[in-house]
Amino acid sequence: MSLCQRKGFRIQANGEFSVLHSPDSVEFIGNGEIEQSSLKEILSAGLGFTAKQKDTDHSLTICDPFSLPKALVAMPIEGIEKLPFVKDRSKVDYSMIFDEAEETTWQALRSRVEERSNDNTLVRINLSDGVDALGQSALGELKPANIEKLTTLNLEIEEDRKFVEEIQLLKAIADNASSTKKHNTETDVYWIVVSGLKPVLDLHGNNSEAAKEACTLLDDAIDQIYQAFVSAYDGKVVIAAFTNDASKVRNARSVLLDRQSRAADGPAYKTNSVKSTGGAKGAPISSDFNDNLLTKPEFSGRAKVYSEDYPVIFNIILWFGVIFFFSLLTICIAIGDMDPGRDSIIYRMTSNRMKKDN
């Protein structure tokens, strides 16, 4: 049995996105499949921001708009397809397709937060930069935390040593979480990239004792991050982790574009069988393949998402129409009640005497 199977992972998924914590005001729903490029929509919507892509399924519900999260902690774990931590901690899991680099997602999310305010804590830390590069960061001085005695990982091996350094930095970030929090109403984003696990798994193997110990260390460090930020923000924080494999981004993106172009071509592709290039001619394709190829978006039951200018334009048109209607009604009533005497313009324009004088 592989390491991923022992941890309870879904082997069929290309990647995973898990929400470890969210306040009661935000409810993530559905265990469906998402694309990595939609993470910026999901995470920004979870913070209460308006989505920019109207056709994106956010898979969440805002239960209380007056008690939105004050912070987001996202932990992309590079180079792997499955999340190496205990599933019992996860509230919601999504299968994810790699179609965007994690740094691209970070840049898009950061720009959206900066549009709202300039007084935010926006931190992206790549733990692979090491202790020297991150000694003095936006989270304060990060002093590597002590690690208990290692059993199988060897600090004399470069891959093991770099991974242990990342675990030490994760624990240091957890220790500094409460002291770096700003006491304001703005939204803070912490983006912590873990990249040292993949080399360890490649070196020792997924089923090795070293791999088990590495996953245990990462699990403990994530738990400390979880506890520290939930305590620092009084529970009003979204904590998420997701996998990221840059080597598969380009291939997944080309497949998605091909699916979109086929779906746009219409019923021509809605066939039950095709001719294969190899093997028996006219061999039918399984119904699962056809369903995956031509999947239509399911009805989500949520209202259409409008732009930020919609309520302004709506109010302008609404009240202009109301004022114009009552103004026109008043003019019509005044003209209808006008006395057609000799002093009125109605009398002058309809008088037979005036016509004779002309």
Image (cartoon, rainbow, N blue to C red):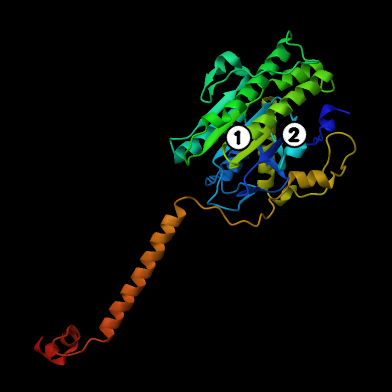
Image height check: is 95 above or below 154?
below
Image height check: is 140 above or below 92?
above
**Residue 154 image position (x, y, % from top left):** 76, 11
- The residue closer to the viewer here, 72 or 312, is 72
**Residue 10 image position (x, y, % from top left):** 80, 37
**Quarter containing the C terminus:** bottom left
Q: Is residue 310 left or right of residue 127?
A: left
In the picture of the structure, the residue carrying the numbered disc 2 is 14
Q: Is residue 237 left or right of residue 317?
A: right
Q: Along the polypeptide, which appears first: circle 2 or circle 1?
A: 2
Q: Which residue is at 51% across, 25% downward?
A: 138
Q: CA distance from mark 2 to mark 1?
A: 29 Å
- The residue closer to the viewer here, 73 or 339, is 73
Label 2 is placed on what type of residue? Asn
Q: Quadrant of residue 311?
A: bottom left
Camera sees residue 189? yes
Pointer 1 local density, CA inside 10 Å: few below 14, some 14–19, many at least 20: many
**Residue 233 image position (x, y, % from top left):** 57, 38
**Residue 1 image position (x, y, % from top left):** 89, 28
- The residue closer to the viewer here, 33 or 157, is 157
In the picture of the structure, the residue carrying the numbered disc 1 is 229
Q: Is residue 60 left or right of residue 281?
A: left
